[in-house]
């Protein structure tokens, strides 16, 4: 949708328009309150600044809307549709890679107690598996920050696709 359209929507409609970007209501509401945005750059700068404030609670809340890498998100809701597109590289992955990713996800969840989150768009299955294995060695603090950075990247990518 056009930026001008987003600026003119009612608050409820504006929040609905960006809800799929990230499952963090406070971020959605802050973006709605920040209107009208003069430019796309201003919109994205605000989204980025708000996302840099996220801590563990926001990460846990958002993960509910992001299926595991390699697990096909079945569903007609917008998040599932977006996830399938973002993770399209895994649909072409061979059995060995699928298995390795599944085992990697299990190891990550055993280590950190939450789903492995990565900005999947533009990454091959092999690249995501390599990132998972690299990040498995991270300390808790470092890994939380990396996961938050990836969540921010996914959010901004989705926002850019939603408002042009
Ligand atoms: N666990 C994940 O990282 N999921 C996802 N990353 C994306 O970029 N889209 C997803 O659904």
Image (cartoon, helix red, strand yellow):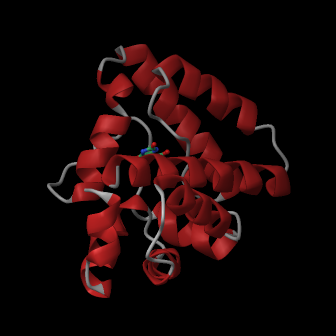
**Residue with the most extreme left position:** 76
Q: Where residue 137 sits: x, y (%)?
A: 80, 37
Residue at x 47%, y 20% (from the top left corner) = 124
Residue at x 29%, y 25% (from the top left corner) = 91
Instruction: Locate residue 29: give its quadrant.
Output: bottom left
Residue at x 60%, y 47% (from the top left corner) = 150
| Front position in the image: 5 or 91 | 5
Instruction: Locate residue 20: give its quadrant.
Output: bottom left
Please, is residue 60 above or below residue 147 in the view?
below
> Can the viewer see residue 73?
no
Q: Where residue 144 sits: x, y (%)?
A: 73, 56
Q: Where residue 67 sits: x, y (%)?
A: 39, 50
Q: Is residue 11 left or right of residue 139?
A: left
Instruction: Locate residue 32: give its quadrant.
Output: bottom left
**Residue with the most extreme front position:** 38
Q: Is residue 65 left or right of residue 24?
A: left
Q: In this figure, what is the number of numbered marks?
A: 0
| Front position in the image: 63 or 148 | 148
Please, is residue 61 above or below residue 132 in the view?
below
Specify the quarter for ligand 1: top left
Q: Is residue 70 left or right of residue 142?
A: left
Please, is residue 12 above or below residue 50 in the view?
below
Q: Where residue 42 sits: x, y (%)?
A: 56, 60
Q: In this view, does 105 lie to the left or right of 13?
A: right
Residue at x 31%, y 17% (from the top left corner) = 92
> Can the viewer see residue 124?
yes
Q: Quadrant of the N terminus?
A: bottom left
């Amino acid at each position: 949708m056009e930026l001008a359209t987003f600026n003119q929507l009612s608050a409820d409609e504006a929040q609905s328009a960006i809800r799929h970007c990230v499952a963090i209501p406070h971020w959605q509401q802050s973006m709605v309150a920040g209107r009208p945005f003069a430019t796309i750059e201003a919109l994205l700068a605000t989204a980025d600044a708000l996302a840099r404030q996220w801590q563990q609670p926001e990460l846990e809340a958002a993960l509910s809307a992001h299926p595991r890498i390699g697990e096909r998100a079945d569903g007609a809701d917008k998040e599932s549709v977006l996830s399938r597109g973002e993770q399209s590289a895994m649909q072409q992955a061979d059995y060995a890679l699928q298995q390795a990713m599944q085992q990697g996800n299990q190891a990550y969840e055993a280590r950190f107690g939450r789903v492995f989150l990565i900005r999947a768009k533009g990454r091959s299955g092999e690249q995501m598996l390599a990132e998972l294995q690299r990040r498995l060695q991270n300390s808790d603090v470092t890994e939380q920050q990396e996961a938050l950075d990836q969540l921010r990247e996914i959010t901004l990518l989705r926002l850019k696709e939603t408002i042009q």
